[in-house]
């Protein structure tokens, strides 16, 4: 496997009936160190990142089709719940 193949993110799944919509909140800088644990492929204009910071996990949504880039975040939650999301 090449470096390109190992660093290529996942593609988001298509929306399904009966799922809970994510409430998105504006991104605000914080003093906590944020670690990106997983991310989706950047072949689409919207990229999602599974982030961990300050003992919480959350999803970050980056829309690269806007200028400036629109960055939104989900609520902070326990790790298992964020991974399920």
Image (cartoon, rainbow, N blue to C red):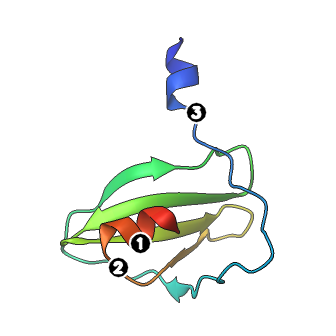
Q: Decide: marks 3, 1 in contact (CB < 8 A)? A: no
Q: Residue 62 placed where, x, y %?
A: 59, 65
Question: How crowded is the residue under tag 3: few (<14 C-alpha within 10 Å), some, or many (20+)?
Answer: few
Report the residue at 51% width, 88% height from top: 25
Q: Residue 27: x, y in percent?
A: 45, 80
Q: Between disc 3 and disc 1, whose residue precedes?
A: 3
Mark 1: which secondary structure?
A: helix
Q: Are marks 2 and 1 in contact (CB under 8 Å)?
A: yes
The count of marks equals 3
Badge 2: residue crowd in 10 Å (few <14, some 14–19, many ≥20): some
Q: Where does label 2 land, which residue?
A: 77
Quick one: label 1, few (<14), some, or many (20+) residues within 10 Å? few
The alpha-carbon separation of the residues under discs 2 and 1 comes to 7 Å
Q: Position of residue 51 (x, y in %)?
A: 37, 62
- What residue is at 65 percent from the left and 46 percent from the top? 42
Mark 2 or mark 1, which is nearer to you? 1
Question: Pointer 1: what residue?
Answer: 81
Residue at x-position 44% and y-position 59%: 50
Q: Is residue 55 above or below residue 50?
A: below
Disc 3: which residue? 8
> Which residue of the protein is positioned furthest toward the top in this rendering?
1
Q: Which tag is nearer the camera, tag 3 or tag 1?
A: 1
Q: State the residue in front, 37 or 4.
A: 37
Q: Is residue 27 above or below residue 8?
A: below
Under circle 2, the secondary element is loop
Query: Which mark is in front, 3 or 2?
Result: 2
Name which of mark 3 and mark 2 comes first in the sequence. 3
Residue 64 vertical placement versus 1 (above, below) = below
């Amino acid at each position: 496997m090449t470096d390109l193949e190992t660093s290529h993110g996942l593609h988001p799944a298509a929306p399904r009936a009966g799922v809970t919509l994510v409430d998105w909140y504006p991104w605000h800088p914080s003093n906590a160190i944020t670690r990106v644990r997983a991310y989706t492929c950047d072949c689409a204009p919207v990229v999602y990142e599974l982030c961990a910071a300050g003992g919480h996990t959350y999803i970050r949504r980056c829309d690269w089709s806007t200028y400036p880039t629109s960055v939104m975040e989900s609520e902070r939650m326990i790790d298992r719940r964020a991974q399920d999301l």
